[in-house]
Amino acid sequence: MNKYPSAKVSYDFDGNCTIVNDGINISEDFYMPLTSSEEEAWKQAAISIRTKQNFDRTHPNRMDLSTLESKMNRLDKRRKKRKNGNKKSS
């Protein structure tokens, strides 16, 4: 977990494990179930980090018009390649 190098295991009063970085539970944003296993807590934290990265990568507010335009151009190129490729093979 390169993004949170100072993350540590934390236990609550009920014996549940959570992964905490600077006092913030990493899995809390995604309502991951409580676990008593450290291994499971690390797995849940990794899933939460990957999910957050995917959300951040594809969030509409993150993209500006130039990014959107270049993305559409790439998609159009792929579509044209497929169309041309299918015509040749028929």
Image (tube, rainbow, N blue to C red):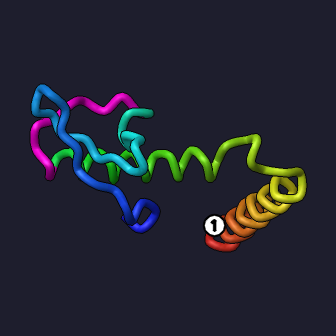
Does 76 appear above or below 55?
Answer: below
Q: Is residue 64 left or right of residue 8?
A: right
Which quadrant is home to the N terminus? bottom left
Q: Which residues are magenta?
A: 30-39
The residue carrying pointer 1 sits among few (fewer than 14), some (14 to 19) or many (20 or more) residues within 10 Å by Cα, namely few
In the rendered view, tell whether residue 64 sits above or below residue 84.
above
Residue 47 locus on image (x, y percent)? 35, 48
Image quadrant containing the C terminus: bottom right
Instruction: Identify the residue at horizontal 46%, vertical 63% (top origin).
Output: 3
Q: Give the SS element for disc 1.
A: loop
Residue displayed at 82% across by 58% down: 67
Instruction: From the viewer's side, name the closer residue of 82 and 71.
Output: 71
Quarter of the image for residue 59 reads top right
In x, y percent, where is residue 62?
74, 48
Indicate left or right for 27 with 35 as reference.
right
Q: Determine which residue is flagged by label 1.
A: 90
Residue 30 pos. (x, y %): 41, 33
The type of residue carrying mark 1 is: Ser
Front-lying residue, 66 or 78: 66
Instruction: Please report the residue visible at 83 percent of the width from the left and 62 percent of the height from the top.
Output: 70
> Against 40, is 84 above or below?
below
Question: x and y percent of residue 8 in the render?
Answer: 28, 54
